[in-house]
């Protein structure tokens, strides 16, 4: 049985893997996933432009069943896989807490 | 409620200046503005503008341009001042030396719109046309006496502040749009959507230095806060306004988008899935970016060229300072 810590790690991996694969296949049009490190700057590094952001946000919202407020979408939250993972985790936690309370 | 764009017109001052001359004269300001950016981003800032010249207010000030445009639009719509029930002025930069309390009020007096309700608001830059349309429709929907609305904007850059790099270079213009309820002529408004994000108000701001207005562009905020959501927000509004009429992108015959820069127009073109060259040519090279008059200028040119035919679907879209995004859908 997995403890909470392991579950957290698995979730992190799942988020990063899914996002990495999406970016490689859809935004970078086939650039090998291995080139996208956890800390690779996606926006400030020029890998994702403003148009690519439309697809990325749509993917994140559909994949993880979350919704982004316009204010949440900026380079401080979505510039790296690490930041994306952190933001998704926070939103999932809020969503789950809301579901538990309802 | 049935509201149509009865007519639209614009006016530009006769005097002009090359964009090259503007950027040369404002070199120090441009360098200071772009300093926070990476060398690569600094280099890109002035590339792909697609703007050669701008028109510059001299003898004619923004109010004069608005008066010219409003008079033309009224003549085209076949109305007089007495027919106008609402005047909305949405100028963002009506002129540092403008002595008028409100362009709308002065216009009301000069056009003979004796009973019009007059309102000026200052927000939105290029996106303000949608705010004005939405506001006019709101008034119309709650007051049956408001049948005809005149929407105007007249803008000029403060002295020494024509460069808005890394975004654009501003030219001066005035424009007017007449909306008529239960009218028979002109495109029928199907929907208008707008959004503003106040936390980005300082991305492009007006400040006063030594008694003079200056436009301060926060290039870092433009790059990091605005651009990641710039097309995303536009796209969401486009989808929203289309969905509310059970339409989709493929149904749109003409996209009428602003003249901020060629690279911005390319971005919008990619956003809506048009091929290269898919957006119509506009007079942007000659006029520069004229804030909210851009959409009116482009619409009027398309009409003059006979490109808009009855039944075609028009989608107007723009985003501007504030920060403000807006989309309007109409059936010709």
Image (cartoon, coloured by chain):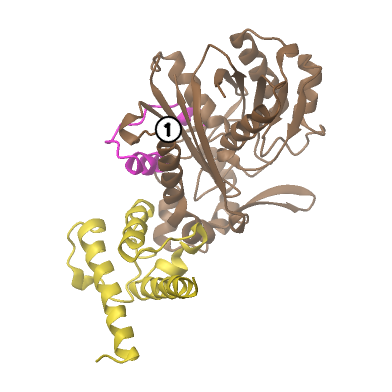
Chain colours: A yellow, B brown
Element at badge 1?
Answer: loop
Rendering coords of residue B272 (x, y %):
34, 40
Location of residue A92 with respect to B228 vertically, above or below: below
Q: Judge from the rendering whether residue B143 lies leftward or rightward of residue A97; answer left or right.
A: right
- Front residue of B95/B22: it is B95
Say left or right for B142 vs B330.
right
Picture residue at 40% right of the left edge, 38% below the top: B243
**Is B268 inside the magenta-drawn segment?**
yes
Nearest the viewer among B72 and B142 is B142
Q: So how many labels did they put on this image?
A: 1
- Residue ranking furthest to the front: A102
Work out whether residue B222 or residue B214 is closer to the camera in this orientation and state it. Answer: B222
Quadrant where the N terminus of chain B is found in the figure: top right
Which is nearer the eye, B301 or A21? A21
The chain containing the residue under callout 1 comes to: B
Look at the image and tell me in which quarter the C terminus of chain B lies: top left
Residue B46, position in %: x, y?
A: 45, 47
Q: Please state the horizontal and vertical placement of residue B126, each as a whole percent of the image.
A: 56, 39
Q: Residues within 10 Å of mark 1 (few under 14, many from 20)?
A: few
The span picked out in magenta is: B262-287
Magenta-colored stretch includes residue A33: no
- x then y, percent, for residue B328: 50, 33
Q: Residue at x 63, y 9 (%)?
A: B75
Q: Look at mark 1 in the image and give the residue it sits on.
A: B245
For residue B113, above or below residue B270: above
């Amino acid at each position: 049985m997995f403890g909470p810590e392991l579950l957290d790690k698995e979730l992190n991996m799942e988020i990063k893997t899914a996002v990495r694969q999406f970016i490689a296949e859809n935004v970078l049009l086939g650039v090998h996933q291995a080139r996208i490190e956890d800390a690779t700057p996606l926006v400030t590094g020029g890998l994702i432009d403003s148009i690519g952001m439309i697809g990325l946000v749509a993917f994140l919202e559909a994949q993880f069943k979350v919704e982004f407020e316009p204010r949440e979408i900026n380079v401080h939250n979505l510039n790296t896989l690490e930041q994306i993972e952190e933001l998704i985790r926070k939103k999932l936690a809020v969503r789950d807490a809301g579901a538990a309370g309802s | 409620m049935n509201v149509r764009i009865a007519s639209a017109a614009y006016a530009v001052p006769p005097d002009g200046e090359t964009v090259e001359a503007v950027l040369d004269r404002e070199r120090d300001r441009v360098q200071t503005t772009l300093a926070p950016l990476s060398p690569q981003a600094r280099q890109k800032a002035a590339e792909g503008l697609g703007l050669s010249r701008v028109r510059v207010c001299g003898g004619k000030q923004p109010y004069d341009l608005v008066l010219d445009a409003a008079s033309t639009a009224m003549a085209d719509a076949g109305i007089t001042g007495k027919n106008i029930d609402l005047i909305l002025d949405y100028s963002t930069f009506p002129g540092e030396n403008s002595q008028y309390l409100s362009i709308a009020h002065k216009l009301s007096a000069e056009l003979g719109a004796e009973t019009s309700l007059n309102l000026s608001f200052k927000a939105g830059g290029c996106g303000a046309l949608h705010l004005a349309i939405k506001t006019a429709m709101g008034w119309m929907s709650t007051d049956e006496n408001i049948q005809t609305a005149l929407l105007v904007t007249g803008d000029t850059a403060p002295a020494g502040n024509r460069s808005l790099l890394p975004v654009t270079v501003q030219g001066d213009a005035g424009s007017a749009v007449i909306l008529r309820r239960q009218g028979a002529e002109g495109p029928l408004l199907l929907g208008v959507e707008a959004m503003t994000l106040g936390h980005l108000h300082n991305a492009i701001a007006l400040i006063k230095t030594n008694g003079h207005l200056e436009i301060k562009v926060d290039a870092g905020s433009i790059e990091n806060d605005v651009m990641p959501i710039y097309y995303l927000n536009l796209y969401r509004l486009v989808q929203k306004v289309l969905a509310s009429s059970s339409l989709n992108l493929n149904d749109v015959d003409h996209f009428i988008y602003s003249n901020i820069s060629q690279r911005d127009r390319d971005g919008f073109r990619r956003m809506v899935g048009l091929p290269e060259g898919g957006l119509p040519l506009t007079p942007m090279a000659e006029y520069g970016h004229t804030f909210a008059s851009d959409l009116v200028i482009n619409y009027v040119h398309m009409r003059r060229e006979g490109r808009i035919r009855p039944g075609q679907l028009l989608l107007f879209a723009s985003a501007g300072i504030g920060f403000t995004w807006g989309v309007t859908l109409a059936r010709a």
